[in-house]
Image (cartoon, grey):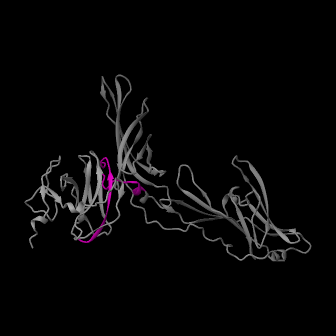
Amino acid sequence: MRIPKSFRPVFLCAFVVAACSVADDTETSPEESGLVQFPATAFANAPLLTYGNTTQPIAYTQATGWRVVRWNGAAGDELVATIAPTTADRVARAYLVEQRGSQYVAILSGTQSIDGVVKAKLEKTQEYFIAFREYRRRNASFTVSLAKTAGLPTGCTGTPLLAQGVIDRTPQAAEPGLELSGTFQSSIRFCNAGSGCADPVTVKALTHDRLTSEYNGDGRVELLGGVSGNSWSLEHNATTGELAGKASVDTGGGYRKVSVDIKGAATTGCISFAGGTRVEVDALTYYDVSVTFTGSTPPVAPPRIAYPATPPPAECEGQPVIADEEVLARFPPSTSSVELGKSTSFVIDSQSCHPQTGCTPWRREVGVKYLDAWTMSVSAYLVSTSSLGIKLSGSYWGANNYGRYESLKLEESAELQDGFFTPAGSRDVLYGGADMAQTGSISDTHVFVRDVKLWTTTSSYSSLISTSRRYACVPIIAHP
């Protein structure tokens, strides 16, 4: 069937710097050249996209025709738009489009894409569009991501690595960042206005670096590294993938360190930076210094595993408590107190979490090394003719922070009520910090003492959250 002429795309010659080109689309005829024109109806109510963001999935069918997103671009913007299918067997045909009068036409030779990636440098400040469909016109769903970049480093592939890309490549429960190996090279040439320049001295070495992040509201990320007397620090723009900072280069001789401005980019395939400077030593002599770094971006981390927010139960947790009368039955006749048991086994359950990368599994430490010399004794005593109390005694002998040995003894008392007690003093019998509230219970076989709240700490330089729960299960001496 012959397609009516009114439904065919119209081809126009562009006035932009790029030459006219044939849009490689099955709708074009071999004789025609120019830029594709799209029906204006496809652009009505197009969703607005901003740099650094991604749309929700957008469905395509032959009935819906071309799908469109729009954004406000500025002259000089260098961008990458990624039209990604939600299923692996689909691919997007996409064009960069602008409005000319009442017409919508594809612009800039080379920006049309059959792999879902559109790269361009914008010529004007105006509204721009990405028009896309499934390459073979099959039903499909796509997301559209838009990123600004100052251009990908030479030899680097992929799209700009933004904040989410760093998070996606970070191991579970770690502060967002990338571990990578790369090649650093510095070239230093010493010159004299009268005698000329010496041969460049080149230092080339493999280095292991970490792209760290401080996601403290502004998404700031830094690349820190150093090798062979050289060091560098760059800030990674979390919304464009650009890198900018300074390197400190060891020149040798009397003029030891030179500061070099460096720029680069992080992509899903490569992280790279470069820079150079001339340093005047005196009226006759100067250094020419240049540095480069290139490393492969790590792959996406394995899928995250969800771990529970509460620690696993203690071995004596959940046992039914015994009545005060059963505790009193353990008193030898005519006595006012009885030792219930002793324990040197302290347990710490701990978990580290990060709000963007998840949590580690719970880790259990039994017989904690720095508590090896810490002993807890539990005894019961008569408070009155009708009530009992529990006494917790702790003793410690070991080296303090100054290397001297110290002896420490703590005692806390609490009233026993229906099998439960809460140490009322200010001392910490679990040696976990004076601010740790504790509680206890008595079963037929154990006295269970634990922190009743989770201990959460965050540092000023990290978003990691460490949570721990301390406890001791003290076996009760057999009934006489």
Please state if 350 lies on the left or on the right of 407 as rendered.
Answer: left
Residue at the extreme right:
334
**Quadrant location of the N terminus?**
bottom left
**Residue 11 drawn at (x, y percent):** 12, 57
The picture quadrant where one finds residue 103 is: bottom left
Please state if 354 lies on the left or on the right of 105 as rendered.
Answer: right
Indicate whether 113 appears above or below 206. below
Count of numbered marks: 0
**Residue 435 drawn at (x, y percent):** 69, 56
Residue drawn at x 78%, y 76% as measured from the top left: 323
Please state if 271 lies on the left or on the right of 229 as rendered.
Answer: left
Q: Does the magenta stretch include residue 162?
A: yes
**Residue 462 visible at all:** yes
**Quadrant location of the C terminus?**
bottom right
Most foreground residue, 341 or 382: 382
**Residue 292 visible at all:** no
**Residue 117 drawn at (x, y percent):** 27, 58
**Residue 462 drawn at (x, y percent):** 53, 52
Q: Does the magenta stretch include residue 282?
A: no
The picture quadrant where one finds residue 472 is: bottom right
Residue drawn at x 40%, y 42% as measured from the top left: 245
- Magenta range is 138-166
Indicate whether 51 appears above or below 337. above
Most foreground residue, 132 or 363: 132
